[in-house]
Image (cartoon, rainbow, N blue to C red):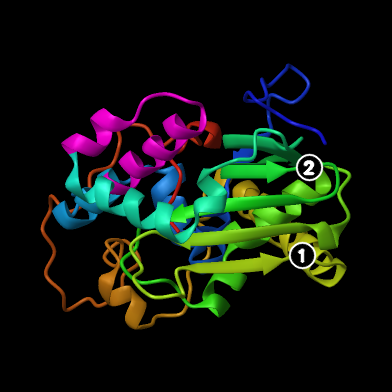
């Protein structure tokens, strides 16, 4: 199995490659114009306190799991945060086989496992919360701290599921049917706290086709953007009611907007997507 423990350094021959994560692909597919505002022009909005609190808690849990996996002490984390302590306790009771590796088993385990795959003029990147693999099979784990598990159909369509499985298949020698992925919802109290996905040839071909189509669109949109043409808008829908960029899109003209809602940078240069923060699922 091929492993990549560090980020790929761009050389002079691939300096124009842009890194794309599942978050970028999800937003491109959902609303190309919002991708432009978020990543090309870096328009920012005030952070919702509740959302920020949830993001911090999720980040702390991921850090906790990472430290535990590499053998660092975690008691200080647990004692200082009752929520983390409860999540870890429940997770240990629900999935002891994941948290207690067999030291006599020849198995590869790595937290925050990073992989890249060049596709067209892009470097597609994935980071697995945990990868467990042996000579025959490989399993990706992803921790979610949402209060309720997401619907399986929604997860199946999400680029995180599609891209994580696809990249592992493309960067390893595993048979497709021996690659799998499981989402663990650590706050879920029911038996539906995990949702597994098994890979196969049909899914791999579908993802490859969808990925190439989306990247072709992105290439064209970027070319047009450099010539002054904005990314395309989606049709107006109820989703626009909750979008911070509705004014920029000339949606709902009867709304009132605070001039401080959006803050644009002084120079709207095309950024290196490598430094763009990951978008939450």
Query: Does residue 170 appear anywhere in the picture?
Result: yes
Q: Position of residue 240 (x, y in %)?
A: 33, 74
User: Residue at the spot x=57%, y=43% of the render?
Assistant: 130
Q: Position of residue 267 (x, y in %)?
A: 36, 32
Give the residue at mark 1: 199
Q: Position of residue 144 (x, y in %)?
A: 42, 57
Image-quadrant location for residue 29 = bottom right
Q: Is residue 187 magenta?
A: no
Q: Which residues are magenta?
A: 57-80
Q: Secondary structure at mark 1?
A: loop
User: Residue at the spot x=53%, y=61% of the render?
Assistant: 183
Numbered disc total:
2
Q: CA distance from mark 2 to mark 1?
A: 17 Å
- Please state which of residues 58 and 136 is positioned toward the viewer in this rendering: 136
Residue lying farthest top? 12
Give the residue at mark 2: 134
- Please state which of residues 216 and 229 is positioned toward the viewer in this rendering: 216
Image-quadrant location for residue 107 = top right
Crowd rating for badge 2 (residues with CA inside 10 Å; few <14, some 14–19, many 20+): some
Q: Look at the picture and state if 205 lies above or below 119.
A: below
The answer to whether 167 appears left or right of 244 in the picture is right
Crowd rating for badge 1 (residues with CA inside 10 Å; few <14, some 14–19, many 20+): some
Q: Position of residue 97 (x, y in %)?
A: 56, 51
Q: Look at the picture and state if 79 lies above or below 212.
A: above
């Amino acid at each position: 199995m091929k492993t990549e423990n560090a980020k790929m350094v761009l050389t002079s021959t691939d300096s124009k490659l842009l890194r794309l994560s599942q978050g970028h692909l999800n937003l491109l597919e959902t609303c190309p114009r919002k991708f432009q505002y978020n990543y090309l022009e870096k328009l920012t909005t005030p952070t919702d306190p509740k959302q920020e609190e949830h993001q911090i808690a999720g980040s702390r849990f991921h850090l906790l799991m990472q430290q535990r996996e590499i053998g660092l002490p975690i008691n200080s984390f647990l004692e200082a945060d009752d929520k983390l302590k409860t999540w870890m306790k429940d997770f240990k009771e629900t999935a002891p086989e994941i948290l207690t590796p067999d030291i006599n088993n020849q198995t590869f385990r790595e937290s925050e496992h990073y992989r890249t795959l060049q596709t067209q003029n892009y470097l597609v990147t994935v980071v697995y919360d945990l990868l467990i693999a042996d000579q025959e099979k490989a399993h990706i784990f992803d921790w979610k701290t949402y209060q309720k598990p997401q619907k399986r159909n929604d997860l199946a369509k999400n680029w995180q599921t599609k891209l994580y499985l696809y990249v592992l298949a493309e960067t390893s020698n595993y048979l497709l049917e021996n690659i799998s992925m499981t989402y663990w919802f650590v706050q879920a109290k029911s038996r539906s706290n995990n949702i597994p996905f098994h890979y196969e040839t049909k899914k791999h071909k579908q993802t490859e086709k969808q990925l190439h189509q989306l990247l072709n669109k992105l290439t064209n949109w970027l070319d047009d953007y450099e010539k002054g043409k904005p990314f395309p808008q989606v049709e107006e829908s109820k989703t626009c009611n909750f979008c911070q960029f509705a004014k920029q899109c000339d949606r709902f003209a009867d709304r009132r907007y605070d001039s401080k809602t959006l803050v644009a940078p002084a120079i709207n240069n095309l950024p290196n997507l490598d430094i763009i923060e990951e978008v939450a699922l």
